[in-house]
Amino acid sequence: MTTTSYETESWETSRVRANPNHSDRSAVSISQVDSPAKLEPEKATGRTPAVVRLLVLATFVVILNETILINAIPRLMSALSITEQTAQWLSTAFMLTMAAVIPITGWFLQRVTTRTAYATAMGLFLAGTALAAVSPTFEVLLGARIVQASGTAVMMPLLMTTLMQVVPERDRGRVMGNVTLAISVAPAMGPAVSGLILQVGSWRMLFVVVLPIAALIAWGGLRKLKNVSETKASTIDWFSVVTAAAGFGGLVYGLSRFEGNNLGLAVGITAAGLITIAIFVLRQMSLQKRDIPLLDLRTLRFRTYTVSLILMSVAFMAMLGSMILLPLYLQNLRGLDELQSGLLVMPGGLAMGLLGPTVGRMFDKFGGRVLVIPGAIGISLSLAGFTQISMTMPFWQLLGLHALLMISLAALFTPVFTLGLGAVPPHLYSHGSSILSTLQQVAAAFGTALVVTVMSARSDALEATGVTATIAQLDGMRLAFIIGAVLSIAVVITALLLPARADNAGEFGGHGH
């Protein structure tokens, strides 16, 4: 057996065990690599396939852009004569678009070639970035962010799906570690990079700087990128598109409204989103009988994938909660500016990214449990440490706790992504990665809403009793970190349910695929 056919052949072998009547012809029909000769040398030498390296570069740029506006809100308020609540829509709209578009990518990635998907993602991102750089009004800038987000929503599922298609199982940990490096370092660098750019230029420079870099990566990718998957002709169910966009978009928007004062409106929008998602799920279950779902929920039949999904969601909530609370604490209570706070949390993000390849190699050698369980415990310990924040806690201690959190997340995410997607058959990779990415957006929104709501409620209650605003806010942050620490216990418990490696033959055969 050649290294090129390793993944497809091992999957086919498991299907033959489960179904003795399985024919060679059906094995060929689901082959995911249509250019094996081009990929064989890279697999044989253990190198990361060129297609994955190109997609990692592109993903790094689009994720960097996602966090680059964090420090620009005050500047935008002044330049565009808008309120803080209005300015926050630049982030909210980005998040809503991601939540609405990602569920559709499972169908889209099966319908088009790798090159077409890449060109679509980068084309939308470049168009949105160019429009943002010259936006004369807030409304135009908001539209530009929505266009950017549409491209970003395609890129992450495309990267994960392609990785699973072209990298054999024995090398996935190492390659996923390199992916973790890119997607971890990018958001960590975003606030610091934007802080530096804003020191020397206007908010438009945030887009002007990104534009030529993204254009160069897009050009290089289109020159060298090869198609690695077969396309599958299928019609799109527009009712599913509408309910997916309304349901997931509504849920994320409803959760984001918990930061405001109108609790009833937030609950109503969230409930409407959940009801619409339920309708979407029922529709997909009906379409699955004809094998034409927009988002194939049969991925959830695989236990390891479902456990990974739960684990990733709760861990993502913990990470996003800390990303929201720490800047508020450092800037509002400790008096640091945007650049200083960005630089203080950057080492943790860099450590998470730089450890990615090492974690990947350890996963390939030892399996997932030896990484996931210590990682889950590390998350709990770091969040427990953050519950002790005070007005005098040394900055080195804050840096250490944040670094522990990020390193623990690195030990968790690479195995969880690899085990989860490795547990589903190749023809469901695009749907599996879409569900993972969708849940990331929902978890991010839920984590943000949870910590902000808890912090605000506690702070307001204390201020009503005569406690000073500073002490009340500090106590509110402590309580929010306590909630995060309690949630992290669920991460530890769920981590115990993960296997060391995805048992493809057992899981696939058990479901008769």
Image (tube, rainbow, N blue to C red):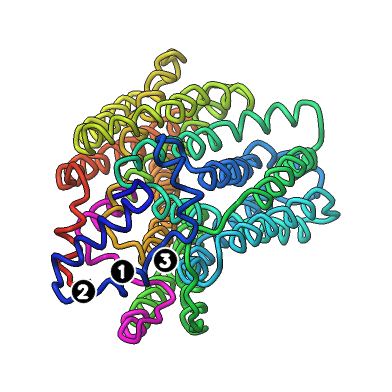
Q: CA distance from mark 3 to mark 1?
A: 49 Å
Residue displayed at 33% across by 48% down:
2
Which residue lies under the disc numbered 1?
A: 27
- Neighbours of disc 2 within 10 Å: few (<14), some (14-19), many (20+): some
Residue displayed at 18% across by 52% down:
503
Q: CA distance from mark 2 to mark 3?
A: 50 Å
| 275 falls in the magenta region | no
Q: Earlier in the sequence, mark 1 or mark 2?
A: 2
Q: Earlier in the sequence, mark 3 or mark 1?
A: 1
Q: Position of residue 460 (x, y in %)?
A: 44, 43
Question: Of the numbered discs in the image, which one, if any, rests on residue 267?
Answer: 3
Amino acid type indicated by mark 2: His
Which residue lies under the disc numbered 2?
A: 22
The answer, for residue 464, to whether it is visible in the render is: no
Front: mark 3 or 1: 1
Question: Of the numbered discs in the image, which one, if any, rests on residue 97?
Answer: none
Observer-nearest residue: 206 or 115?
Answer: 115
* Marks 1 and 2 in Cβ contact (< 8 Å): yes
Q: Position of residue 508 (x, y in %)?
A: 20, 64
Instruction: Report the magenta residues as a range.
Output: 284-312
How many marks are shown on the rendered structure? 3
